[in-house]
Image (cartoon, rainbow, N blue to C red):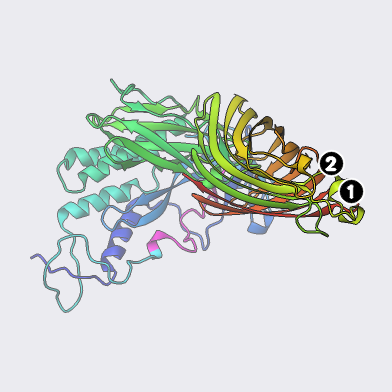
Amino acid sequence: MTRAVCPYDGRVWAAAVVLAGALAARAAPASAQRVEGTILQIDGSEILVDLGSVDGVSPGEPVMLYRRVSVEHPLTHRRIEDRFPLGAEQLTQVAERMSILILDSPLSHAPAVGDTVVVVGTENAPEDETATDRGPEEGAVCPVCPAPQCPATAVCELDPQAKALLEAFGRTLGQTLEQRIVIWEQYLAANPNLSWSAAVARDVDSLRAMLRTMRGGTPELGTGSQGRTGHAPPAQAFVGEPVEIALAIDPLTPLRLAQLHVRHEEERAYQVYDLEPDGDFYLRGRIPDEYVQLDWFEYFLVGVDANGAEGSLGGTVERPIRVPVVERVGAPPERTDRSNLHTSFEYMDFYANHFHRDYYLRFEADFRYVLGSWFYGLRMGFGIFDGQGGPVDGTDWAGNGDGTDPQGISYRYGFTEVELRFHELFYMMAWISVGGAAAWEDPNDASRSREPEALVGGGGKFRIGRPTGTNLELGGGYIESIGYEANVSVNLGLVEHVPLRGHIIVTNMPVKEGDLGVRLVAEAGWQPASWFEFTALLGYGIRNINHQGLSLGLSVSFLW
């Protein structure tokens, strides 16, 4: 009689695990407590283990070496921590908390850091927490023989097919990879068309790939496996930043399984991760940040096609792909935007004690487009330049009782700048401006008056460093009737989203007859979004002890 099934009270889980455990039990009697440690270091045939006299062990103590694996229960799909033996050895030297064992004979598989070492005679003692003492989660439902009604007492009776699956699963627990593969292949041969047979077949493929990795052999290439996939390894990685791995595939010849095997510099064993589908043409995986540490990590890719043939998808265990890992320093990665609409306003007063006797203001708006080749960029815009000035003796109010006015200038212009790249760290820019200056009349001295005139200017600068990172710029220029300007600028890309700049400027502007002055200028900006940047300017200028003052400015940039 088939009994009804409903959300169960734990007896199904208990029965399944007890059945599996009974089939996998050892003949050795269980001690009160399992004594086990972990391999910490391997140096040739010497293995360092975190077991010592405080754990009750002594020189000559026989131990078993195990490799831990995580397996999935075929019916409940819960993860179970299992292990399989690598071989037997004995402790050679025992300290208080550490021991050394020496490999006198070859093991079934090479040991690795992280493998478990268990004192013989305590293997079957219970651990603090194992799969056998974890019942089902509250509200779990029986995965076998569901029925719409529940009896008064919750019971689930396994059908013969589920029982056979659990028996096979139980026989695999504690066995080597080779033995597990044989057990599951025998089960699939006897039960080829059950609902869970495909999942079991995928597990067998995974076991085969793991076995080949442990044996250190090159995966066998199936017919046509090369050329069906494509993978471009990363050129480098940055410390602590996960690395995305992409694998292009042919959807007409799909893979049943694809795995990423990875280890960092200080590991001997590889960790295995499955690649997940991303559409019809790609498989993707991620190398976690804990593997991306100085100075490198290694990985290779293994796949199993629809016919069960294994193939290398990139690298092998003997020749893995090694990726250098470096610290990320300096500026954030260079932006990919190419267009920049920029506006700026600046006011400079060299004679703050007497407003508007030695000053200039400048407004510019421009559009810049980055091509990215040797002809790196092109910038075009227009500007307004207004000011008054001249020689210090002529603008110094204290020394001019006659009240002579400084010369005035009002200039409207357009400009074009080209930028050439000779190296990724060396750039040259050249600009030209053309415009017209308005008439200016000196009421006291007609000879100083100026008629409207066309003015031409030009200049250039060099940049050392990447455009969006930390760099140094050296430049200068000249505009007729307005004067000269030379500058040294430092752009600091140290803080993401906060551009910082410093300038030293030498100029005789706003009129070419003026004396030279020196300006010290600092800029600080903020980029609240990838497409917008706001910058404020503050500076100080001086021509002599009496002619000095502040400069202020603002700029806005739109990036896309």
The residue wearing badge 2 is 515
Q: Picture quarter containing residue 56?
A: bottom right
User: Is residue 276 toward the left or the right of residue 396 in the image?
Assistant: left
Note whether residue 59 is visible.
no
Q: How many marks?
A: 2
Residue 235 place in picture, x, y as percent: 53, 30
Q: Main secondary structure of the magenta part?
A: loop
Residue 523 place in picture, x, y as percent: 69, 51
In the rendered structure, does residue 130 fall within the stretch colored magenta? Answer: yes
Note whether residue 286 is visible.
yes
How packed is label 2: few (under 14 Cα within 10 Å), some, or many (20 or more)?
some
Q: Which residues are magenta?
A: 113-132
User: Is residue 458 toward the left or the right of residue 392 in the image?
Assistant: left
From this view, report whether residue 39 is shown above or below residue 252. Answer: below
- Is 178 in front, or is 487? 487
Is label 1 in a helix, a strand or a loop? loop
Alpha carbon distance from label 1 to label 2: 9 Å
In the rendered structure, does residue 492 fall within the stretch colored magenta? Answer: no
Where residue 544 is drawn, which disc sits there? 1
How packed is label 1: few (under 14 Cα within 10 Å), some, or many (20 or more)?
some
Residue farthest to the left? 1
The residue under label 2 is which amino acid type? Asp
Q: Picture quarter containing residue 84?
A: top left
Single out the mark in the foreground, 1 or 2.
2
- Is 149 in front, or is 474? 474
- Please report the residue visible at 40 percent of the width from the left and 65 percent of the height from the top: 133
From this view, report whether residue 469 is shown above or below residue 218. Answer: below
Residue 318 place in picture, x, y as percent: 50, 25
The residue under label 1 is which amino acid type? Asn
- Is 298 in front, or is 190? 298
Sequence-wise, the earlier of marks 1 and 2 is 2
- Please report the residue visible at 61 percent of the width from the left and 30 percent of the height from the top: 432
